[in-house]
Image: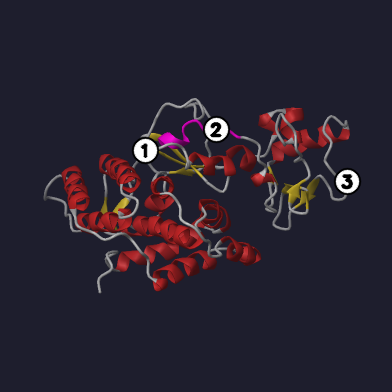
Amino acid sequence: MLSFHADYACAHTGRCCSSNWPIPVEARLVKTVSQALDTSHLVATTTVVPALDASPHGGIVLGRVHGRCVFHDTHASGGCRIQRALGEAAIPLSCRQFPRQSVTDPRGTSVTLSHYCPTARRQLDRPDAPVTISDRAVAFPRHGEYVGLAASPDVPPLLHSRCLLDWESWWLIERRTVTLVSEHPDTALPRLALMVEALHVWRPGSAPLVDAVHRAFDLAQIAEVVPWCPSASDVDAHVEDVRSSVPAEWRNDVDRALMAGTGDLPSRVVGRFLAAHTFANWAAYNGRGLRTWYRSIEAAGCLLWVTRDPGMVDLALRHLADSSALITRWNRAERRPVIRRP
């Protein structure tokens, strides 16, 4: 996990319980919750709607009233009545995982957080400190439950459609990118674009790939670049990518999420937010190359430029958009260099 996420702990703000999204209940939990309701060991906050309801897409979901789960209330020990009555193991998987997004590869499981969670959002405002990748944190035990993307150990991310990276080189890219975007938030994206294009020309049989990665980053670090400022067309393209990847019933929600905001964000917040989209990034594993991966980070930057709100950007990118559809659109970046030239 990233160092500024390492001590994350749920503060029961209820954002995940009151966002009007369906919360599916695994079959093994339906019986547990039903029995607790029948014996009044568990009581919903209302009887206006069924506590357990049939989803139009199949399966069972928790009931909702005015967008709020019928088991959520305000309580000093936590807002979930299921958790208080039956324990954490009895709450649905989507509740147990929020706001985590994880990737498992040969290194282990990497976890980043969605800043749509207000508690995770506050992690971005921590006092200045170097951003690193940490592998020891009480909040993220090695034996914890992490359900996310499972990468094939035999297939590292792609450099481009005709060439795989190796795992050592990919983890080096990820580590150095976390440092780059957190230390140079104002120029992170143009520097990262230079690195991607410098590495794109590497071919097997030349210098070792890991050496080429170091050289590409070293050149990007010292390059003279101007502060990043997306064009209106770039912003429009990224907004369209996201909107087109959101199921029709959630289009109004994504439009509200991506409304233009005002004010400026501190540089450390921008850098940490970009680092959180660099790390445990699904586009690196499911996309067609580093240009696709870059496009996903640029999308986070563009949407943040518009909204000035990390939470709303993550609502759009991590929760409302279909990740497969979004990565398919980002894959178009492989057709041409990601460096924008006049």
Q: Is residue 1 in view from this perspective? A: no
Quadrant for the C terminus in the image: bottom left
- Residue located beneath label 1 in the image: 131
Q: Which is nearer the N-term, disc 3 or disc 2?
A: 3
Q: Which mark is residue 145?
A: 2
Q: Which mark is residue 47?
A: 3
Q: Which is nearer the N-term, disc 1 or disc 2?
A: 1
Q: CA distance from mark 1 to mark 2?
A: 25 Å
Q: Is residue 75 in view from this perspective? A: yes
Q: Is residue 3 magenta?
A: yes
Residue type, numbered disc 2: Glu
Q: Position of residue 55 (x, y in %)?
A: 74, 54
Marks 1/3 in contact by CB < 8 Å: the verdict is no
Q: Quadrant of residue 214?
A: top left
Q: Position of residue 206 (x, y in %)?
A: 11, 50
Q: How is the image coloured?
A: secondary structure
**SS state under label 3:** loop
Q: Position of residue 158 (x, y in %)?
A: 31, 53
| Position above or below: 226 against 126 | below
The residue mark sitting in front, 3 or 2, is 3
Q: Residues in magenta? A: 1-10
Residue type, numbered disc 3: Thr
